Each structure stands twice: as C-alpha cells, then as structure tokens.
C-alpha cells in the first residue's frame, strides 16, 4: 500500500490530515507493524501486531486475591499499572460472576473485597470474548476496498472476489431496494 492509496481510501484531502496519517504510519513502522519497502510504500506485518495474552487480567486478579478488603478500582489500577477503564470493566464482570463483592464506601468510591469463590479460584477467570456480529461483513467490505485499490477490478478473478463479497453483504443486509428497484423506468 502507498501513502496515496491510504489518503484516497480514508478521504484525506487537507495537508494537516495527511501529516497526521504520516505520523501514525511512522509509529507503525517503528513498532514494525508496517515494513517500509520504499519511500511512501509499505507492507503490513501481521506477526508484529500486538497480541492479547491476558497479562492485564492476570495482574488484576493477583492483586484482588492478595489485597485486604476495602480496595477500589483506582487502587487496583495503581498497583497493577493497568488502565482504570480496563480494571473497572474486569471488576464489573467479576462482581456479576460473584468473585468480588462491595463492602462499603469511602466518599463516592465503592470499596470491594474478594469473595470465598475468588479465594478458592487460583487460575485467572477471563471474561467471555464477545464476537463481533458483523465480523464477516466488515471483512468483506475491507476486501472489496483492498481489491478496488490494489488490483484491477476488470480482471476476471478480481471481479469474482468483489461479486462474492458484495453478495455476502447483500445476504446480511437484504437485497431489497428502498424506494423502488434498480430497473429502468419506462415512461
């Protein structure tokens, strides 16, 4: 992919927008997620993309099990060096599952404690991974854009892939046309 293709795909027209994208591309190159082939030309390196290994959940879980009753989300975020939002979401799930329970307040801060269920569970419980209901459709749309930008749509194989992805989108969102049909109106 090239800078020009990215500018077109993202609809960037002003120089500040393009400069912002170039800075983000440079960051991805430093993290080795993008490989610079030549000036302004890049290739994506999926192996270098950040992986979710659950280390954050493990840290928060260890802190919960080892803390005395009366801790809050801010306390866990400081101890574990994880974001407050991640700690809050994880703790809300743990509360729903019965691993932690509220024990009082300190001003506006709700305080928690680990339940017997948490004390008896050594392995880190993970919240379920919610699958994106539109994952296939998003993938089809991305493939269409990629084929339109990087390939020749008039080639038979490319056109067939575009048609297949369009059919996938139509199956999901319906082939019904609002306001009539695509047929020529005869007057």
Image (cartoon, grey):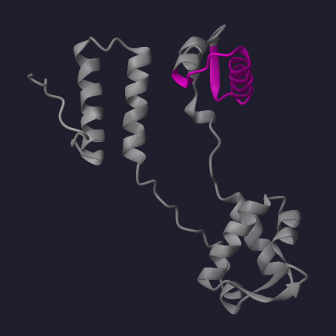
Q: Is residue 54 left or right of residue 132?
A: right
- Name the one closer to the observer, 15 or 30: 15
Quadrant of the frame with the C terminus: top left
Region of the chain picked out in magenta, as a range: 9-36
Asked if residue 106 is among those painted magenta in the image, a careful observer would answer no
Residue 68 spot, x, y in % from top left: 87, 85
Q: Is residue 56 left or right of residue 179?
A: right
Q: Which residue is drawn at 60% across and 17% down?
A: 42
Residue 109 spot, x, y in % from top left: 85, 78
Q: Residue at x 68, y 67 (%)?
A: 89
Residue 131 spot, x, y in % from top left: 46, 57
Asked if residue 16 is among those painted magenta in the image, a careful observer would answer yes
Q: In this view, does 175 lie to the left or right of 11?
A: left
Can you tell which quarter of the image residue 24 is in? top right
Please indicate, yes or no, whether residue 123 appears anywhere in the rendered image.
no
- Name the one closer to the observer, 99 or 74: 74
- Prevailing secondary structure class for the magenta stretch in the rendered image: helix
Can you tell which quarter of the image residue 100 is in? bottom right
């Amino acid at each position: 992919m090239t800078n020009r293709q990215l500018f077109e795909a993202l609809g960037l027209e002003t120089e500040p927008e393009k400069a912002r994208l170039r800075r983000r591309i440079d960051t991805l190159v430093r993290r080795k997620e993008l490989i610079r082939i030549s000036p302004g030309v890049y290739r994506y390196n999926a192996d270098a993309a950040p992986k979710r290994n659950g280390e954050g959940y493990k840290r928060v879980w260890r802190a919960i099990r080892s803390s005395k009753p009366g801790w809050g989300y801010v306390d866990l975020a400081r101890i574990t060096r994880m974001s407050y939002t991640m700690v809050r979401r994880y703790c809300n799930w743990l509360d729903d599952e019965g691993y932690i329970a509220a024990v009082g307040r300190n001003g506006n801060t709700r305080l928690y404690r680990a339940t017997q269920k948490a004390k008896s569970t050594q392995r880190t419980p993970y919240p379920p991974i919610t699958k994106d209901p539109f994952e296939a459709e998003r993938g089809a749309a991305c493939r269409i854009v990629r084929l339109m930008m990087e390939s020749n749509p008039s080639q038979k194989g490319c056109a067939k892939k575009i048609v297949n992805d369009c059919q996938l989108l139509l199956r999901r969102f319906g082939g019904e046309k609002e306001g009539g049909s695509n047929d020529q109106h005869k007057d």
